[in-house]
Every structure is written in structure tokens, then in C-alpha cells.
Amino acid sequence: MTDTVSETAAQAAARREELVRRRMAGRRGTVATGIAPADRTAPLRLSYGQRQMWFLSRLDPDSAEYSVPQVVRLRGRLDRAALGRAWDQVLARHEVLRTRYALLDEEPVQLVDPAATGTLATVTAADEQAARAWVAAELRRPFDLAEQPPVRATLVALGAENHLLVLVLHHIACDERSHELLLTELAAGYAGTELPAPTLQYADFAAWQLAQQEQTERQLGYWREQLADLTPVTLPTDRPRPAVRRPDGAAVRFELPAELATELHRLAEQHRTTLFTVLLAAFQAQLARYTGTPDIAVGTVVSDRTSAQLAGLVGYGINTLVLRTRWSGDPSFSELLARTRSTVLDAFDHQQLPFARLVDELQPERDLSVTPLFQTAFTMHEQRATTLELAGLAVEPVELPWQVAKFDLSLQIAQLADGRLAGQLEYATALFDEATVARLAGHLTRLLAAVAADPDAPVGAADLLDAAERSVADLPVPGLPAHEWDGLTLHRIFEQRAARTPDAVAVSFGAQELTYRQLNERANQLANRLRVLGVGPESLVGLCLDRSPELPAALIGILKAGGAYVPLDPAYPADRLAFMAGDAKLAALVTEPAHQELASGFYQGPVVLTEELDGQPVTDPAPLAEPDNAVYVIYTSGSTGRPKGVVLTHRNVVRLFTATEGSYRFDRTDVWSLFHSYAFDVSVWELWGALLYGGRLVVVPFDTARSPEEFHRLLADEQVTVLSQTPSAFRSLANLPTEGLAVRAVV
């Protein structure tokens, strides 16, 4: 009986894997949709994807971010009249290509214009330079979706036998598969081939999709749970993030060696999964190395054409899935791959929920500097011959002079006909330099080689650096080489730092200062007191303090005791503090007399007051915690409004700094500001950035943090060199003069 069940489960998994392969390739599955024609007597509503594109277009009407261009060169004797008729026929066949969008009773609707002739425009260019200049301008020209159709087709004549065909479509009316269909139909029309009339128009699909309320409602619960308390993947960047996201992008292309591609195919087969899943797992592992967190959400695109009826549909026929993989410790790649495989299969089982609907339901905090839910993406496809084929003409694709980056970073892998893998890292030029992204491509290639060679080795053991990077990474950081941090906890690194520079100022708060020796001894007193109370590895200790030098001392002391801290900001509402304290099952609470009464209202366990530690030993306690033990549990607001704890380990934080030090080269001369609340995860970067490298931490008073002018004055007075800011806070600060500041890095 067990064998039968096991075989059935394996067969089911295999079927799901095949479904993943087919949908990633844009091929139809076995879903019988049975889509009926839409009621043309009623207003034609937009699909979820169209509605999202319409909203984004209205948000920034001067942007061409969602234009989808294609340019091909036609060499030979072109029959312009035949090409014009063929293009007219393409537009006549597909309503979505001659649809405008208007508001009716505060709702966007589709207005289908009648088919027309002469829709292929023509221009003449004096030479190649003039032609390319015209194309560049055309690609940047936005669409007015209320007044114009979402497609422009132009034939640029450079000579009797040299033309450029420039097609620009708005994403509201097309996707990659649509381009393939349009080129195929254009070639057929040019050759005079009669094509059967489409059985389905996009408006029919939109009406059908909107009617699937019950099915999408069932899937919403899965996504709510899967994306609860989702935190953004914040990569180290070359420049501060702009307050408003910019679409300008570029790409770095690379190719995986043929032998490595073969090994990756073999690895996928051995683990009964897809190559897509193998590459996704590696990409997520790479992002985790850069960010220091084992909770990585990556977006991907799948086809909505899940039946034969939808195979020839032109229009926005894709959906976006958020693939979130979480793990702990340092798993082998085989273990991570199994977890990622489960994530992918579950996501594809719930792919019918439109991404736009998901965003509306989850309502993530709106931030104009980032895209909602994810900022990194991964796509993979089989590279098929989609170039236009016209009788008697040589057709060549033309490299486009402009590229858009819809996300911070996107990995795109094309599987070539011979099995080789061609990669492209598309990036936002506002954030990254080309050299940085080229290094990322090299890191990914080396990571893939490492996991293919030994999938059972810990992912964290893979060496991502090339020889040149290794020679730089091995240079000692003044005082404490970062390569000595492997296998150490945060407080052990801090203890080494305190031993090397005991008299250097570690923390300042107005006129108050603590040296590294004083800070270490103060932390030891708390640690020894907590040990008496039974605090050890994985014990959670509440921390309810105002901003002062006692704050970093208490935080370090909790870690030295072996525990992890739970920030309980006294500014929080009492009911929120009570929920967090109860949910965390605190082993103890550290507070100060000013908040003793507040603490008694939400916690009845052991309480340690920072003012009552003078009699405790000042020596370092014997270490108990390991690198994979928790550092903190920070409670986020949660997608449902109910706080939920997010855990970070010592290893996560150490990796965050070892992954970024090549870019920033922090050292003991740096001055850091603790600007954010210790209940906010950015505070981890601010506090440990200073103390691990031997710098000085300036604790920013609460009122100063609320005043850009006062904070600006503090930055100048304290000569802060490393600054961490949210986009909104930095916007206010950026308008002030830079004279007198020493800031060299804004993160």
C-alpha cells in the first residue's frame, strides 16, 4: 500500500513539474476554459493585467516604461504595398490592437475602434545615423491610451533595398508571445496566405477572467499565508535609491559554459525537478549571500494561455508569481533545491490569481522608490526562432538603443537550441554600475559551478570570488580581518574588537561616551545577570529602553548571555507590546526605571533594570551561542495587520557585512548614526556596522531623528561618515546644504 501511495505521489509531482515546464515555455496545458464571447452590448471591462498597465500609464503618462518594441532590418526588394496590407490585416484580426481606454462611471473600459487601412506609417532616413536617431526617439515616445491605439508600426526607408520595420506596442495590448504571433501573421499576410479568423478576442478573455471570482478567491488564502510579513530583498547598491523609481536600465550578457549547462541539466534530472527550479534556487542563494537573510522573494512571469483556446490570443496574456523561499542555517544545495521545488510547485498550483488582484488584496505599503512585493525577478524561456520571415528578404533583428529595467535586478536565462544557456542580468542604472552587475554574473556562474560539482555541500561554502576579487578580499581590514569572522558570533567579533582597541570611543550620545572597554564591561554585567535567570541559546529577551548608550550595551549583553533580543519600543501602543511579549514567550525583560510601570502592564516574568547591574562581573561570560542561533526577533506589522516575528541569526548579519565590505571598505575611522528605532531592521546595519569595524556609533536622540534640520546639524557636528536612510527620510535631508558634512556612504 505504501509503495502505491509513494508512486502516485511521485507521478503527481512529475505531472506538476511538466506543467511548470509547459507554462514557463508559454505552451498550453490541459485546462478546458470554455471561454464564451463577451457581451458587446455592455461596457467591456479590463482584465486585471490591463487594469494594472492602465493605472501605471495614468500614474506617469510621459513614461515609455511599458512600451514593448521590436525592430528588424529588411534587406532586399520589399513590396511596401503588400507589407502595408498585411499589417492592416493583423490589426483587423485582433481588436486589442485597435482598442482605446476610457473612464466610464469611474471605471476604465475598452473602446474598440473599427479596422482601418493604411496603418503602416513610412518615414525616410538620410542615413544610418539618422535612422537610429529616429528609432531612439520613437521608442521613448509614450502612448496616450485614451486617444491612440496601443500600437505603432513604421517602415523606415534607408534605400530601395534597405528598410527598418519598427513595431512599438504598449504592454497593455501585448506580451512576448503576442510578438511571436504578430510576426507569424504578418509573414503570412505578406505571402498572401489566408488565415482562419481568430476564435477569441482579448475582450472575451478579460470578461472570462473577471468572472472567475470563486476560483481566485480560493487561491487568495494561499498567497496571504505565503507572503505574510514579506520583507523586501535589499541589495547593496552603488548609489542611494532615488525617492521615485526610475525605469532606465541596461543589461549585462553572459553565457554559461556548455559543460556547466550539461551538469545543471543532469542536476535537475537527479533531483526530479526542472532546470528553472535549479537556477532559481541558485539565484536565491546568491541574493541571500548579498543580503544576509535566508528569506528571498523573487518574481517570475508565467503564461495565462493555459488552453488550446488561448494559444492564439494576442494581448496581455501573462501573470506574475512571487516565489518566496525561506530556510534556516546553512543548508546544502540539495536541501535548498527541495525547498525551492516545493515553493515553485505550490505557486504554479495557485497561479490563477492575477498579480494585480494580489497586490490590491495584500495592500503592501506604497513606496514610489520600489515595485510592490518584490524587487528582483527571474525568468527562463526556450529561445525559439521568432524573427520575421518574408519571402525574398533577408530579415535581421536590430539591437535596440534603449532598455528599461522594471525591477532593481532581473535574471533572464534563455535555453538555446543546442542546450547551452545564455544569461542576461537586467539592472536599474540608477542603482548599479555595469562593473558591479558584471561581477554578479561572475558570482552566479561560480556558484552554479560549485553546486553542480557538490550539491550536498553547504551553499555558504561556495566561493563566489574570482582571483582578482579574492586578492582584494584577503587584504586585512584594519584591526580585524573580515575573513576571520567566519564561524564567529557577533558578540565574539565585538569582544575581539574591544580587546584590540579598548580605549577607542564606541558609543556617543550627546556629551556621554562609552569606550569599547566600557561598553564591553557594561554588556558583560547584563549578560552575567541574565545567565543567572537561565537565559541561553534561543532564549528570547525583551528590550524596552529609550535611546541612550545603555541601548547598545543591553543589546550586546543579551547576545553575550546566549539569547536573542525582542525590541519592545516604549513608544508602541500597550496592546501591541502585550501581544509581542506574549507571542514571543519571553524568558526575561530588560528595561529601565522610567518604563518599569509600562513593562509591568504587559509582562509578568523576570525583569532586569539596567541601573541595577553595578555588582555584576565585568568579565566576558563563556560563549554559548553559535552562528546559527538567533540574534533578534523583530515584529513587523504583517500583511493582515497582526504583528509577526521575523528571526535573524548571527551568521545572517555577519554575511551582510562580509558581502558588502568590498564595496564600502568600512574601517575604524568611520562614524555611524543609529538613526532608526531598534525595532526596525535597519538598526542592525547601523549598530553592527560601527561596532564590528571599530568605528563610533552616534545614538541619535528621538527628537533629533524627527527633525531634518536637527539631524543635519548632528551629522555635521559628529562628522558622521556612514548614513542609513529610508527614501522618505533622505528626501527631506537631501534638500539641505552639504557643506560641513563628512558623509562618504549612504546606504
Image (cartoon, rainbow, N blue to C red):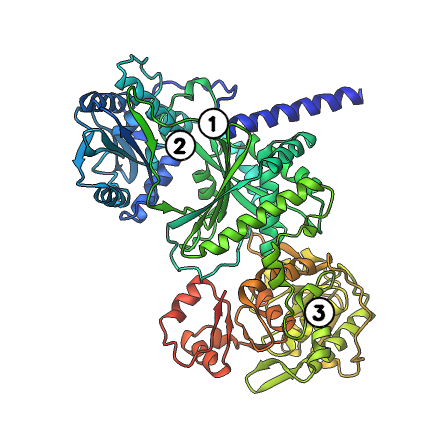
Does the image show residue 274? yes
Helix, strand or loop under label 1:
loop
| Residue type beneath disc 3 | Ile
Left or right: where 41 falls relative to 353: left
Q: Position of residue 224 (x, y in %)?
A: 55, 42
Which residue position is annotated with label 2?
A: 176
Q: Residue 553: where, in percent of width, then height?
A: 67, 75
Q: CA distance from mark 1 to mark 2?
A: 9 Å
- The residue drawn where x is 47% and y is 63% is 726
Pick the front one: 210 or 411: 411
**Quadrant assignment for the N terminus:** top right
Is the residue under label 2 in contact with that under label 1 (CB below 8 Å)? yes
* Residue under pointer 3: 493
- At 44% from the left and 17% from the top, the residue drawn is 34
Q: In this rendering, is residue 6 above or below 538? A: above
Mark 1 crowd level (few <14, some 14–19, many ≥20, 10 Å Cα)? many
Answer with the quarter of the image where residue 280 lies. Answer: top right
Q: Which residue is mark 1?
A: 26
